[in-house]
Image (cartoon, grey):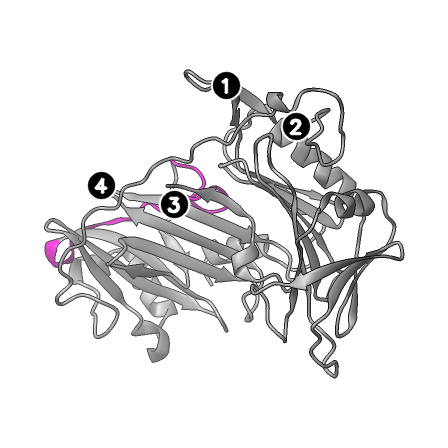
Amino acid sequence: MTAALASILALAACGDKDAARKTDAPQPAAAATMAPGAAAPVLQITSETKQFRDWSATCGNDGTCWAFGFAPEYAAGWVRIEMAPGPDAQPRILFGYWPNGDAKASSQIALTIDGRAFPASLSDTGDAEAPVGEIRTDARPVVDALAQGKDMIIRGASTQEVSLHGAAAALLWIDEKQGRLDTPTALMRRGDKPASTVPVAPQPPVVAAAPAVDQTGFGDANQTVPAALRARAEVGNCLKESAMPAVSDMVMSARLDARTELWAVPCGAGAYNVTHNWYLTSPGGRDPRPAALIGTAGPGADPNSPDNATVNGEYDPKTRTLSAFAKGRGIGDCGSAQTWTWTGQRFVLTRESTMGECAGVPADLWPVAWRTR
């Protein structure tokens, strides 16, 4: 496996309770500026993830934050608290688990904190094999209980304990990041400071995709690496590492515009991950240069040293997006997912989500560190 893959999977390693990461340039936790012509301050926030014992917390570039609590290592259970930015936001709570193998599906699911039951409804984000519950009434009593509690259990077809160690610290960090400390809207440290002082959500950056172009002769079948690209030393090494026919045939290509082609060279594979290196070329594969795929963390996070590797990557010519999904394990409940959009000049990161704990969280419910409009 390539160094890029190893780095990504290290981020997604199961049971790493001590890992923490920060992304982008550090800024004040809840800096705010005044919107032109508006009375409400606008939140200035960086995408960041921190670990608090058995809980982790992530805030995205749009100001939305998530706190996750997990079952003990090698078990599958989790609780997710989502908090949007702004003075009117209310917490949303989802939780899930994997029932024991001999347990029958149940239409009932609930959280129990220190013996007090909080009924929930089954969410359509889960299924019978991995049910997901949602607290659809007032979630604040649940937040208060888990922040001060000692024991939390998910009850359904079977039961699963989820640790509360670190929950209060994770929620307090979210209050700080969103600028809601000492206000009635805070998750943890509430006070009499007016809710109107809580900054409103920032506008994510706008990314416009280039117009679609004809793809005749390009795609992901029967493609051969052009001679000029094959001549690059690192490409030759990749092709040697991908000598198995099932991998070496995974060459992909696309026409980006009349002057630019996109080529993906397979560069190693594991049980459920395939690595590709991506290149931009002139027509016919001439003048190859690595594509710059910049993310918020890990390989490619430094704009001055971008990466051109993806894990389980593919390009969609209709949406002009290149996507990647590095699985921490085969079922895909942990790892990293990214999407870049071709603007006509370069690939720009438009979405990134990461789940560093292998606890059964569906990929659609991972925290989104970066999003655009």
Label 4 amino acid? Gln
- Rendering coords of residue 368 (x, y %): 51, 47
Seen at 52% across and 53% down, the residue is 7
The numbered mark at residue 33 is: 1
Relative placement, left or right, of 137 versus 345 is: right
- How far is mark 1 from mark 2, CA to CA? 15 Å
The residue stretch that appears in magenta? 283-303
Residue at the spot of label 4: 345
Q: CA distance from mark 1 to mark 3?
A: 24 Å
The mark nearer the N terminus, 3 or 2, is 2
Label 3 sits on residue: 350
Task: Tell me which numbered mark, 1 or 2, is placed earlier along the sequence.
Answer: 1
Residue at mark 1 to residue at mark 4: CA–CA distance: 31 Å
Cβ–Cβ under 8 Å for marks 2 and 4: no
Residue 132 or 290: which is nearer the viewer?
132
Is residue 13 positioned above or below 37 on the image? below
Q: Pointers 1 and 2 in contact (CB under 8 A)?
A: no
Determine contact: label 3, label 4, CB under 8 Å. no
Mark 1 near mark 3, Cβ–Cβ under 8 Å?
Answer: no
Tag 1 near tag 4, CB within 8 Å:
no
* Mark earlier in primary sequence (1, 3): 1
